[in-house]
Amino acid sequence: MQIRTGIGLRQPHYEALLAAPPPLGFVEVHSENFFGAGGAALGVLEAARGHWPVSLHGVGLALGSAAGVDADHLRALAALVRRIEPVRVSDHAAFARAPRRHGGPVVHGNDLLPIAFNDAALGILADNVQRVQDALQRPLLVENLSAYLRWADDRIAEPAFFNELVRRTGCGLLLDVNNLVVNALNDGLDEDGAAAAACRWVDAIDAAAVGEIHLAGYTDAGDIVIDDHGSRVHAPVWQVYRHTLRRLGQRPTLVEWDTDLPALDVLLHEAALAGAACAEVAAG
């Protein structure tokens, strides 16, 4: 059985990865870093595409924004998709764009801000996802967010919210297991309780909709747990990942590491651990 684990393609690792390409299932990049019409970065991405499938993961569509999707951003993404022909395209269930109070250009918050889980937010998200899918002529994967607050008008359980988004738009889901654990820890649960809560979340989601899984490390800062993608995957996340594989079956899995990047061997070892978990669960 092919183990479909991947890593993020990050600039400090470009040379080593391309000089001796390891047997990865895929590599993933942040779409916005490759919006230019040419240049060295795009050349590296095209070279990488010769060795591995490429997944485009965006951080700027702001899919949950009532102000809508930025047309220029969407055009640039569509051009990149046509050029690279990625295996998957994804972004987050977050908002970042809002109109100014007294008119003028829309403000972009340059962050992944949490949306409410209610009917109004669902309608906005669904409309924006559909617009992106129409432009790209392919399904989009939408990622669940790590959030540090909850809205007072939340009315829908998060898994049910995503299930309904899938039903309305035909999109897929990018299931970030680390985000589930981080949110549960920030709800005051210990690691065992957080893992159990995350597993219940996974059990409630539409299994057929999940097109990719993300794993990452987090930092426990004492009063808050931060989803910083800056360390090895923690034990509760591995626990939930194995549960997820048992429920969903194997899915393409990315080890995210975006801050305090380690030596490439460390990152490849984390991807190998994910591959080993896939093989272990598949073997029963």
Image: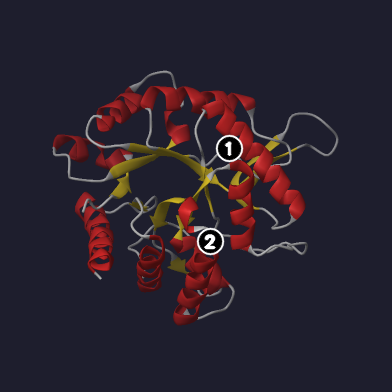
Camera sees residue 12 = yes
Labels 1, 2: front one: 2
Image quarter (top left, top right, bottom left or bottom right) of the N terminus: bottom left
Residue drawn at x 49%, y 80% as measured from the top left: 193
Q: Callout 1: few (<14), some (14-19), or many (20+) C-alpha neighbours within 10 Å?
A: many
Q: Which mark is residue 61?
A: 1
Is 243 displayed left or right of 99 in the figure? left
Residue found farthest to the top: 37
Residue found farthest to the right: 102
Nearer the observer, 205 or 33: 205
Residue drawn at x 42%, y 29% as measured from the top left: 34
* Identity, as a three-letter code, of the amino acid under mark 1: Leu
Could you say whether the residue bearing mark 2 is in a helix, strand or loop? loop
Q: Which mark is residue 113?
A: none
Nearer the observer, 33 or 169: 169
Work out whether mark 1 precedes mark 2 in sequence or the reverse, and give the earlier one.
Answer: 1
* Identity, as a three-letter code, of the amino acid under mark 2: Ile
Q: Callout 2: few (<14), some (14-19), or many (20+) C-alpha neighbours within 10 Å?
A: some
Q: Where is residue 53 drawn, in percent x and y?
A: 30, 37
Residue wearing tag 2: 205
Q: Where is residue 37 drawn, in percent x and y?
A: 43, 18
Nearer the observer, 156 or 93: 156
* Vertical arrangement, residue 17 with respect to residue 257, above or below: above
Camera sees residue 9 = no
Q: Where is residue 210 drawn, in percent x and y?
A: 46, 52
